Amino acid sequence: MKHSAAAPYLEILATHEPFSEMSAADREDLLANAKVSYHGPRETLIAANSKANECWIVVSGRVRGERSDDKSIGALELTVGEMFPIGALLTARPVISHFFAEDEVFALRVPANDFLAAVDRSHTLADFCDRRLTYLLERSRKALQASYVAEGSAEQQLPRTLANLIRREPITTSVSSSTKEALFAMQSKAIGSIVVVDSDQKPVGIFTERDVIPRIVLAGANIDSPITTVATSPVATLPETATAVDAALLMAERGFRHVVVVDANGALKGVVSERDLFALQRHTLTGVSGAIGRANSVAQLAVCASDARQLARNLIAQGVESLTMTRFVSRLNDQIAQRLVSMAATYHGIRESDLCWIALGSEGRHEQTISTDQDNALIIADGAYHDANATNHDAIATFAKEVNDSLAQCGFPLCKGNIMASNPELALDARAWEARFVEWIDRGDPQSLLQANIFFDLRAIWGATQLARELQTRILQTAAFNQRFLKQLSDNALSTEPPLNWLGNLSATAEVNGKQVIDLKKFGVRPFVDAARVLALAHEVVATNTVERLQALAEKGKVQSNEVREWTDAFGFLQSLRLRAQEKNQVPDMPNAVAIDQLSPMDARILKECFRQARKLQQRLQADYP
């Protein structure tokens, strides 16, 4: 390599992805025949529609790529360590963009054959070229995890699959065994659970030490009876390829402490316990979930809410993927809200059939973060105000205010815009709600669009959930057939542009104490949320979660699956960065903001790409509603 013109630049490239992860030999082979070239400002490097003969690697300066069809949305900026035109080289197609030097540029130019040979030889380079944004996101998460471990935390990371969590051969009993035999086996093996299997070793039930008192002692069960009479059946299982996150979610949702793991044929592979998942973690998912279920007062639930937020902070520090993180937060918050609503309803004599408590906004989308206020409302069943056995209007109003106040005590601030169930304007029967939606759709003024953005993300939390489902079905049909409304909603979604300047660099959205900061909620997350909502309404997608909306659109053939992968990766990183900003309180009084000068080079690079993806999604929206 010492005679190669690229030799002096190896050290520079070795600090940038993906070159830093390639072996020294693979780097040298890639650059063995590379040429070094200098280019002045505005000089064309590759013309649009030309043949891709070389892979260019920027070693100093900035390169801009512009699509001929739309310069504002198709533009991208490339800096030190970045390559182009990768897509054209891999697919042997003409170059789509016009690439030129923004200022003085030095570049390495690798012959196409050498580049393609390096891709075949180096798994790291191939992986990067195939899924650039996903690759960078994984590297960012690994860096965060490494930093967390370096700080000496006692918390344990979540392993990737259940297969590597199984610590011993599973202890089983047959369907013909007695309860007494099963109990003896548990005692002799010092285990907390035993799996009941059939002749094919497929699990048909599970019995745990927690079942002994309620199912045997208090129930006066005959221990000589078959174990199947007291075991939990059917048993919830997960494949051995499932992640620890999947197991943790199942435990949180069902209140389990053990998850039965099966192989590809459905045969028992092992058992994973809560202790296996979070051996060193003070706050556990099932621990918090169980405490919520046992709580009998607002004060107790406030403690649970605090524990849930601490758990969220622990998982953020561990680098748990952000979309999973927000699912954790939202589901625990759901359980807190459900418990508060249930307690208040019992006290005020309100039946579940009387009404449906609905979540709106980020809670309705399952996208709540650590710092989140309330957005909720009520759908009241027909006759809940009138028949002799039902509650009256005043009782429902009092009940709703009590729940909102209780949620505030649990750390969910009252909504400044009064989007809460205690607002009489937001406690309506189904017909009145439908009329309200029709009014917003017909009017299409700024206030109506604002309301639509919040209320179209409704999701049932407690009570007569069919009221929410039926309302959602009707309003989706109404919205989908009103093209004027969808165009207005689209224009509103396009009004918030991702913060990239004309050079493609990060652009501050505010200045706080002399720091240039970006509001990640308004200018990062919101473009994805708003665009996904418009497309979902246009195609009657029932899902309210942003990622689920995009995935449903791909399943319907309305968008490309590869586009959805890029959009969801970008959305996930923005949520992750936002969660980290909230956890560190980086910008006082702006929990969703990040200071540009405090971003690592990796995060700054990924953030720019995420904003480019937001522009692409907006471009798609603009194409549908020009």
Image (cartoon, rainbow, N blue to C red):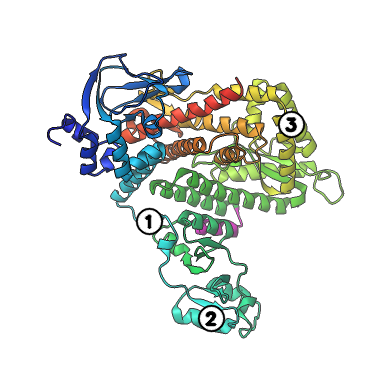
Report x, y in % for residue 104.
25, 17
**In front of the other: 51 or 118:** 51
**Seen in the image, is 87 located left or right of residue 27?**
right
Report x, y in % for residue 187.
48, 80
**Seen in the image, is 31 located left or right of residue 270?**
left
**Quadrant location of the N terminus in the rendered image:** top left
Could you tell me which secondary element the residue under label 1 belongs to?
loop
**Seen in the image, is 447 located left or right of residue 118?**
right
Mark 1, Cα crowd under 10 Å, few <14 / some 14-19 / many 20+, is: some
Three-letter code, disc 3: Thr
Residue 192 part of the magenta-drawn span: no
Q: Is residue 231 visible?
A: yes
Residue tagged 2: 183
Question: Nearer the N terminus, badge 3 or badge 2?
Answer: 2
Question: Nearer the N terminus, badge 1 or badge 3?
Answer: 1
Query: Which quadrant would residue 75 be assigned to in this image?
Result: top left
Three-letter code, disc 1: Gln
The residue at the point 45 percent across, 34 percent down is: 591
Q: Tags 3 and 2 in contact by the CB under 8 Å rule?
A: no
**In front of the other: 235 or 60:** 60
**In front of the other: 168 or 356:** 168
C-alpha separation, residue under disc 1 versus residue under disc 3: 49 Å
Could you tell me which secondary element the residue under label 3 belongs to?
helix
Mark 2, Cα crowd under 10 Å, few <14 / some 14-19 / many 20+, is: many
**Seen in the image, is 56 located left or right of residue 198?**
left
| Res 451 label | none
The residue at the point 54 percent across, 35 percent down is: 560
Segment tinted magenta in the rendering: 285-297
| Res 156 label | 1
Residue tagged 3: 478
Report x, y in % for residue 217.
61, 79
